[in-house]
Image: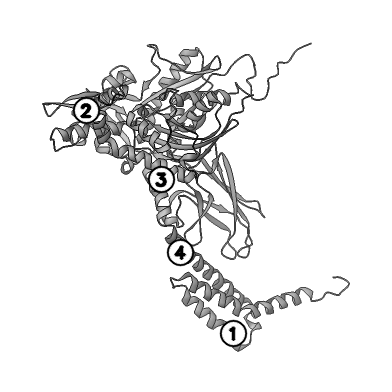
Amino acid sequence: MALLQISEPGQAPDPHQRRIAVGIDLGTTHSLVAALRHSVAECLPDEQGRVILPSVVRYLPQGSGSGRQIGWDALAAQVSDPANTISSAKRLMGRQLADVAKVGQLPYTVVEAPGMVAVRTVAGNKSPVEVSAEILATLRFRAEDSFDDELYGAVITVPAYFDDAQRQATKDAAQMAGLNVLRLINEPTAAAIAYGLDQGAEGVYAVYDLGGGTFDVSILRLTRGVFEVMATGGDSALGGDDYDHALADWVLQQAGASLHVADLPAGERAHLQAEARRVKEALSAHADDGQAVTFATTVHGQALQQAVTHADFATATAALTQRTMGAVKRVLRDAQIDTGDVKGVVLVGGSTRMPVVRQAVAAHFGQPPLTNLNPDEVVALGAAIQANQLAGNNPDGDLLLLDVIPLSLGIETMGGLVERIVPRNTTIPAALAQDFTTFKDGQTALALHVVQGERDLVADCRSLARFELRGIPPMVAGAARIRVTFTIDADGLLTVSAKEQLSGVEAQIDVKPSYGLSDEQIAAMLQDSFATAQQDMQARALVEARVEVERMLDATRSALAADGALLDAPARAAIDTLLAQTEAARSLTDATAIEAAVEALAKGTEAFAALRMNRSIAQALAGQNVDNL
């Protein structure tokens, strides 16, 4: 008798074979790849035993062998060849030139290109997606060499505040690197996975993630294996690199120089930043407040030396630390909790080794932060745990991951208003729907405009996509039932569909974002929504009143055209007067006055509506007898 090998749901066909899945932390400053070995998550080293891969790619002239250097080799050339050595490419993902913060401080040249910016190199213009793909491919090869096998897939982490465009750019880079993306997850969430599973923790936790180029803060509730992101925020243009810039600028000021780092030639700028990073790391390695480190460099051919203490460093970077704490306060407010509700604070990212950061976090939350996992590695470790489960290697695992979207999603309605369908901080994956109807009689098509933002007017929000639903059967206004559904997958990517319920006609669009919304814009949109809430309410009420005027005028005129003969001369004159008054009210700026005019017209046409109904009933009963009814 032949035996069939049957696998459990979610397992590979051969239960003795394990799918190789990895977690990748694609960072601004450095990147890592991790996987589970013997049920323990660990970061995978290169041939020299180094787990960290600098997120740096150097492009060489065409015809010079491989054409590029990646990681440590590229980092070594950052000072000697800054124009062709690209670091912090993550900051450029999904950006237009106008969105790139401090572009003048970059040692390489950023140019405008279709879709997103590019970097000018001797090998041609390179997209941030291409640069990221080089880093991801290197990590993929490292993992395949470690296991001597091909990868089944990878979970890649992104900042929690990455928008649709930036997430899509990350997926594009992974595809270019030959990786099967099992899921994109937020970096703070990945850190929570590592800490939560290691400690069996439950309760509300804050994750403070300060990397080389991005800052994220998230509030998570951990309950019986469920990781729910309550709120998230941050700044994708703030990180350890900015602390380096701030320290270098401070040193220049102490030396009496009237220029800033951004004013220096690319080579000197790279030297200055490298020395600032060395001093910062040396201070972080020695927590003694009395420790001083000498900052030594050359500016315009002049030797420059400056002793830097912990207090000096804190002074030079105070504004940056305060920016991170401002984001922390906003996220706590979004989550509707106080610092006393937070059970623990997790530090993530190499930049959290700075004493000034740890002291600020401890002071704000009233407790020392958790630091028992390597802050450089914790994100990759959490991603590896998630990847192992998504690959089906741990079908009994009870890990449930719930992320949220950072900004509300909705569609444009009559008058340029936004009807929110998916509120911000909604848990994803999610599918939410709302029913709409037509405005005009006989309308056979509906134009749908998908927008993102917190304001009530479309003009104040970001346009994501437009599409049309055609083939709606002609009906009177308000009779059609059109269901618009927003579906957001686990990666935070959006699909919008519209279906007319009676006829079944439908249309759908995958929102392929036009790269370009910066996190500064996201933060500004949130701030605007709070600052202008009262103004938006008044503007919305005015627009809604004017839309109702249009609807009432159209309906009344249509009724008069069809059944005006039912009215005697005085009744018709009274309705015409009300129509004129309502027409005049359209130009008013007081929503209450407009609503009063509409209400007067509605009340003044009640008798006319009754006459029309009576005639319709009489026509329907004509020729009928009681027995038939």
Q: Which residue is at a point 27% across and 30% down the rendered structure image? A: 244
Q: Residues within 10 Å of mark 2 (few under 14, many from 20)?
A: some
- Residue 22 placement (x, y as % from top left): 50, 22
Q: Position of residue 246 (x, y in %)?
A: 25, 34
**Of the residues under marks 4 and 2, which one precedes in the sequence?**
2
Nearer mark to the viewer, of 4 and 2: 2
**CA gap, disc 3 and disc 1:** 54 Å
First along the sequence among labels 1 and 4 = 4
SS category of the residue bearing label 1: helix
Quarter of the figure with the C terminus: bottom right
**CA gap, disc 1 and disc 4:** 35 Å
Residue that numbered label 1 is attached to: 572
For disc 3, the marked residue is 522
- Residue labelled with disc 2: 308
Q: Would you call the spot at circle 3 few (<14 residues within 10 Å), some (14-19), or many (20 or more)?
A: many
**Mark 1 near mark 2, Cβ–Cβ under 8 Å?**
no
The CA span between labels 2 and 3 is 36 Å
The residue indicated by pointer 4 is: 538
Question: What's the CA distance linking mark 1 and mark 2?
Answer: 88 Å
Label located before the other in sequence (1 or 2):
2
Q: Are marks 3 and 4 in contact (CB under 8 Å)?
A: no
The residue lying toward the viewer, choosing from 9 and 497, is: 9
Amino acid type for the residue under numbered disc 2: Val
- Rendered image quadrant of residue 458: bottom left
Q: Earlier in the sequence, mark 3 or mark 1?
A: 3
x and y, in percent, of residue 8 in the image: 68, 22
